[in-house]
Image (cartoon, grey):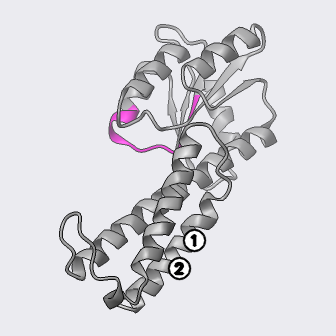
Amino acid sequence: MPHDTRILAVDDREENLTALAAVLDALPVEVVPASSGQAALKELLSDDFALILLDVVMPGMDGFETAQHIKARPRTRDIPIIFLTAAGGESEQAYRGYAAGAVDFLTKPFDPWLLRAKVSVFVDLHRSNLELRRQAALLRRTLAENGAGPGEAPDAASCGGLLPALDERLSRVEDALARMRSGEPADELEALVADLRLALDAFSAGT
């Protein structure tokens, strides 16, 4: 059954792509295979992905060059990248990987449980980000329905005094998301999004 959350797996060896799909089969994700850096960049033109699993050693465009192209595009620069590489020269490759914008680096053969756990974190984070966008859109729509123009807010008293609470919660979610994208922990993001949803429900009920 198709899933809304997609993972892009990039490896020039078919057996490695098959193995990645098998390892992640238990997760509610769709694994989209790409056999080269060029194929990966083509996939990224049309689809949205929660995470990219990127092999380092590939003919033609290697993983580092592929990552540089991904991070140079506004549409894809915020997609997390986990590099996968065979054993040997891990220290130098890990340094280059993090310098290219990777959030993690795993050596083959990797522990399937560890890979699933890491992927799960980024899948949850992606869903929280989508939830934030939906809630922000709802907030903008609700404000518009209450007569707020661009850059304006409706009278707080007429909204039951809930608008300041909404502003504060939305700011906290955005701060947590910004910290996450800069590599800092933001474990409270899911709880903040849930809190924002409750505040939006209360706002809608009182307007």
Instruction: Determine the residue positioned at 79% across, 39% down.
Output: 114
Verify whether residue 74 appears in magenta.
no
| Amino acid of disc 1 | Ala
Instruction: Determine the residue positioned at 36% across, 29% down.
Output: 73
| Amino acid of disc 2 | Leu
Q: Is residue 172 left or right of residue 206?
A: right
Instruction: Determine the residue positioned at 24% across, 82% down.
Output: 146
Q: Give above or below for 100 relative to 157.
A: above
Q: Is residue 140 left or right of residue 15?
A: left
Does any portion of residue 58 appear in the rendered image? yes
Q: What is the x, y in percent for residue 139? A: 36, 72
Q: Give above or below for 98 relative to 1.
A: above
Q: Nearer the viewer, residue 108 or 203?
A: 203
Mark 1 closeness class: few <14, some 14–19, many ≥20 residues within 10 Å: some
Which disc number belongs to residue 194? 1
Q: Element under label 1? A: helix
Does any portion of residue 1 appear in the rendered image? no
Verify whether residue 47 appears in magenta.
yes
Contact (Cβ within 8 Å) of mark 1 with mark 2:
yes
Q: Give above or below for 182 relative to 41.
A: below
Query: Total number of numbered labels?
Result: 2
Q: Element under label 2? A: helix
**Start and end of the magenta stretch?**
43-53
Q: What is the x, y in percent for residue 50? A: 52, 45
Q: What is the x, y in percent for residue 119? A: 66, 44
Which residue, given by chain and number where applicable, does mark 2 sit on?
Answer: 198
- The CA span between labels 1 and 2 is 6 Å
State which quadrant residue 158 falls in: bottom left
Q: Nearer the viewer, residue 136 or 148?
A: 148
Q: Nearer the viewer, residue 124 or 9?
A: 124
